[in-house]
């Protein structure tokens, strides 16, 4: 697992490139182009760290703190599908831990969720790499649902009682709704710095 | 190979969560040093958004300028009358204190801090501010704005610190309901309206009664405005805080000279009233 090239396309080469354009910037890439660019190799990590930073921003909307979209999850989903080898488990763990420490959450909670996201996502990666965006979005919806449920049960266990479930649902909905924006931005950046791949 | 390391990391994360819950102190110094390192970056990063919000507020204000002007003029007149009343009460107070030979209240020193981070959780309610021990902030100090109490300083690094809001699950503030003079503990539960618990009786409490800190336990001085009683339904009365906690940008961290009153967190088991 973790080769930079995508799964072999089932369509003719012409349709394949069109399909690649429709998805967020994945297609075939030359090994040389990818390996030559050390900046591009850092891109997944940098964008994920930016997502962590955005998650912590104070926003003066009443109740925002409880509904902050899981930007880190969006970044991790994107990169685990398109460039899993550039965001290995060790980095996922460190980024998750960093977010927990900065946000005041129990240390290890976000790390666990990000790692489990990778565990769940990697075997099915090929279903999300080529198909058009709605499939990618649907996959993210499933992932977010599972992640939020896990986070909620974790806090129920830790606080020994039932924590607010409606807030979790709203948060999941908000995260899922904002995913297209994140995917678009990440796709553009990926295309710009990594070529058409 | 990568699969093995992935599983190991999953186990490590799970262990950390359990350890972090069992022993609160273990990660505190790590959290503090990470916060300290990230604080300058967060400070810069939060300014553009704050500027945008200020611009949006300015635009909103422009729209309502006439209405606001009338309202503010009327409020100003009312406050000037209150000022006169306050001045005469203050001088009467000084006389009476002199008569009783009451010990003077020591002046409080404070630090003004800016909010540079917010937790993204429904499960934790705290803010990160850009003042730390090198500015004189210490654990247990009160964080207030002009409206009232915001919370209590929980973890303090050298450049940044964390404020535990009064709405947080772990927050316990001894308060008194002014109308009925009933003592209680303001208990946060991560909702917007913390509950009043350990009341002797609920009778005598009306909606709209002011809730202020009682000074019990020597943690906060008495009389800090906290909120008003907003609802009496359910198992406990709920308090609407005076401060709009989601809109706090600047706050004062006050040293009333009582910070020693807050016990350090004890290892290893969590207890009622921890932190």
Image (tube, coloured by chain):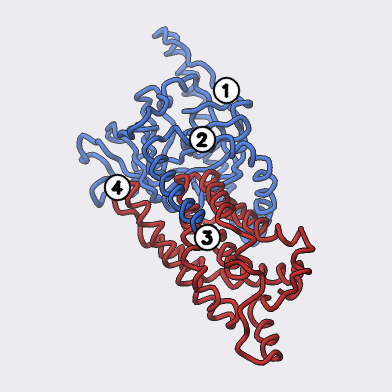
- Residues tagged 2 and 4 counted as in contact (Cβ below 8 A): no
Q: Which residue is mark 2?
A: B144
CA separation in Å, label 3 and label 2: 30 Å
Frontmost residue, B152 versus B223: B152
What numbered label is drawn on residue A160? 4
Is label 1 in contact with label 4 (beta carbons under 8 Å)?
no
Q: Which of the two discs, 3 and 4, labels the residue nearer the N terminus?
A: 3
Q: Is residue B69 visible?
A: no
Asked which secondary structure carries label 2, the reply is strand
Identify by letter the chain in red: A
Q: Where residue A147 appears, x then y in whole percent?
A: 44, 62
Tell me which chain the residue with mark 1 is part of.
B
- Rendering quarter of residue A4: bottom right
Expressed as whole percent of the image width and height from the top left, the position of residue A178 reads: 56, 69
Tell me: residue B238, above or below residue B156: below
Q: Which mark is residue B109?
A: 1
For marks 2 and 1, the one nearer the N-term is 1
| Label 4: how many Cα within 10 Å (few below 14, some 14–19, many 20+) | few
Total number of numbered labels? 4
Question: Which quarter shows the C terminus of chain B?
Answer: top left
Q: Is label 2 in contact with label 1 (beta carbons under 8 Å)? A: no
Name the residue tied to disc 3.
A70
CA–CA distance between discs 3 and 4? 24 Å
Q: CA distance from mark 2 to mark 1?
A: 13 Å
Chain B rendering hue: blue
Q: The residue tagged with tag 3: helix, strand or loop?
A: loop
Q: Label 3 crowding class (10 Å Cα cut-off): few <14, some 14-19, many 20+? A: many
Label 4 marks a residue whose chain is: A
């Amino acid at each position: 697992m973790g080769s930079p090239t995508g799964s072999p396309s089932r369509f003719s080469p012409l349709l394949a490139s069109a399909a690649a354009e429709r998805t967020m910037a994945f297609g075939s890439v030359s090994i040389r182009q990818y390996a030559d660019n050390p900046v591009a190799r850092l891109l997944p990590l940098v964008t994920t760290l930016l997502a962590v930073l955005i998650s912590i921003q104070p926003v003066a909307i009443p109740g925002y703190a409880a509904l902050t979209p899981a930007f880190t999850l969006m970044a991790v989903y994107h990169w685990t599908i398109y460039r899993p080898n550039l965001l290995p488990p060790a980095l996922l763990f460190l980024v998750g831990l960093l977010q927990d420490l900065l946000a005041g959450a129990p240390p290890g909670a976000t790390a666990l969720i990000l790692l489990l996201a990778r565990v769940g996502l990697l075997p099915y990666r090929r279903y999300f790499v080529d198909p058009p965006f709605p499939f990618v979005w649907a996959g993210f919806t499933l992932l977010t649902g599972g992640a939020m449920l896990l986070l909620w049960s974790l806090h129920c266990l830790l606080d020994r009682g039932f924590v607010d479930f409606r807030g979790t649902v709203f948060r999941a909905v908000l995260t899922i709704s904002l995913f297209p924006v994140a995917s678009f931005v990440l796709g553009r950046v990926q295309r710009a710095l990594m070529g058409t791949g | 190979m990568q699969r093995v390391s992935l599983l190991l990391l999953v186990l490590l994360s799970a262990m950390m969560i359990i350890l972090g819950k069992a022993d609160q102190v273990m990660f505190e110094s790590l959290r503090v040093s990470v916060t300290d390192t990230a604080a300058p970056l967060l400070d810069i990063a939060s300014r553009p958004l704050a500027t945008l919000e200020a611009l949006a507020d300015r635009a909103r204000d422009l729209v309502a300028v006439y209405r606001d002007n009338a309202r503010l003029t009327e409020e100003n007149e009312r406050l000037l009358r209150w000022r006169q009343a306050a001045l005469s009460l203050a001088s009467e107070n000084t006389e009476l204190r002199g008569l009783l030979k009451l010990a003077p209240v020591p002046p409080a020193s404070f630090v003004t801090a800016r909010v540079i981070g917010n937790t993204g959780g429904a499960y934790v309610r705290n803010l990160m501010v850009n003042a730390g021990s090198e500015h004189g902030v210490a654990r247990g100090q009160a964080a207030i704005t002009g409206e009232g109490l915001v919370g209590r300083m929980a973890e303090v690094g050298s450049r940044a610190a964390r404020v535990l809001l009064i709405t947080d699950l772990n927050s316990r503030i001894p308060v008194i309901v002014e109308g009925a003079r009933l003592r209680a503990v303001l208990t946060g539960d991560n909702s917007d309206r913390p509950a009043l618990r350990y009341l002797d009786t609920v009778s005598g409490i009306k909606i709209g009664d002011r809730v202020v800190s009682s000074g019990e336990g020597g943690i906060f001085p008495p009389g800090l405005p906290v909120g008003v009683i907003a609802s009496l339904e359910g198992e406990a009365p709920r308090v609407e805080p005076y401060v709009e906690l989601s809109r706090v940008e600047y706050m004062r961290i006050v040293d009333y000279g009582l910070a020693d009153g807050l016990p350090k967190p004890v290892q290893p088991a969590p207890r009622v009233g921890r932190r």
